[in-house]
Amino acid sequence: MIVLYMSMSLDGFVVGPDDSFDEPMGRGGFRLFNWLDDRNGDGPSAQVYAEGQATGALIAGRRTYEHARRWQGDHHDGVPMFILTRHVDPDDVPPGTAQYVTDPAEAAALAKAAAGDRNVMVHGAGAAQALLREGLIDELELSVVNVLLGRGRRLFDNLPAEYIELEQVRQLPARDVTHLRYKVVK
């Protein structure tokens, strides 16, 4: 199963304004990850974090990958990483288990094969949008943080005009965040 794991503000932003390599989450954007302070406990945030860490492969967009400093070649426990990009420079060899892929369907197929019986994690607005446009995401795990950022990069921009039907399968309220899980109805 391919699952989008994203933290977002209540107004739909996944990074604050003026994100860059030097400020990867934009101004105020790291606020979206305060819920991770509770990841080692036994509450809802710890549960969501553990589920994400149990995934067997990762698909991320190139912008997310670069802003995260390529995760120093390892996102979590050495899982294979498939980085969606528009162009592959043959001289740019990614570190660790990462490989560049230009086609969302190919990235999904490679990631599912690599993950085996575990889920595939998706990170990044660009990757999410590309995979959603192709109907390749099975579920959305959204950690909606109790903040309005007002500006930045929205998670669900650049989607087709037709709607994508969702079924809520879980709601876990926690301190300063509500973890919402949706099944994509196909």
Image (cartoon, rainbow, N blue to C red):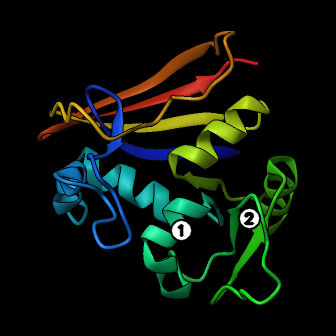
Sequence-earlier tag: 2 or 1? 1
Name which residue lies at 84% across and 53% down.
103
Tell me if residue 168 comes above or below residue 173 in the rendering: above
Residue 101 x %, y %:
80, 64
Q: Which residue is mark 1?
A: 65
Q: Can you give x and y, in whole percent of width and height, for residue 81 in the image?
A: 66, 71
In the depicted structure, whether residue 113 falls above or below residue 179: below
**What residue do we see at 34% from left, 64% from top?**
24
Q: Which percent across, then down, holds residue 73? A: 56, 86
Whether residue 143 sits left or right of residue 99 in the image: it is left
Indicate the amino acid at tag 2. Answer: Ala
Q: Hey, what amino acid is under mark 1? A: Tyr
Q: Residues within 10 Å of mark 2 (few under 14, many from 20)?
A: many
Question: In the picture, residue 37 is in which quadrant?
Answer: bottom left
Choose between 133 and 141: the one closer to the eye. 133
SS of the residue at dot 2? helix
Q: Position of residue 74 (x, y in %)?
A: 54, 83
| Nearest the eye: 130 or 21 | 21
**Which residue shows up at 64% across the image and 10% down it?**
163
Q: Residues within 10 Å of mark 1 (few under 14, many from 20)?
A: many
Q: What mark, if any, has residue 115 been given in the picture? A: 2
> What's the CA distance linking mark 2 and mark 1?
19 Å
The residue lying toward the viewer, choosing from 58 and 161, is 161
Residue 109 can be seen in this image: yes
Q: Is residue 58 left or right of residue 117?
A: left
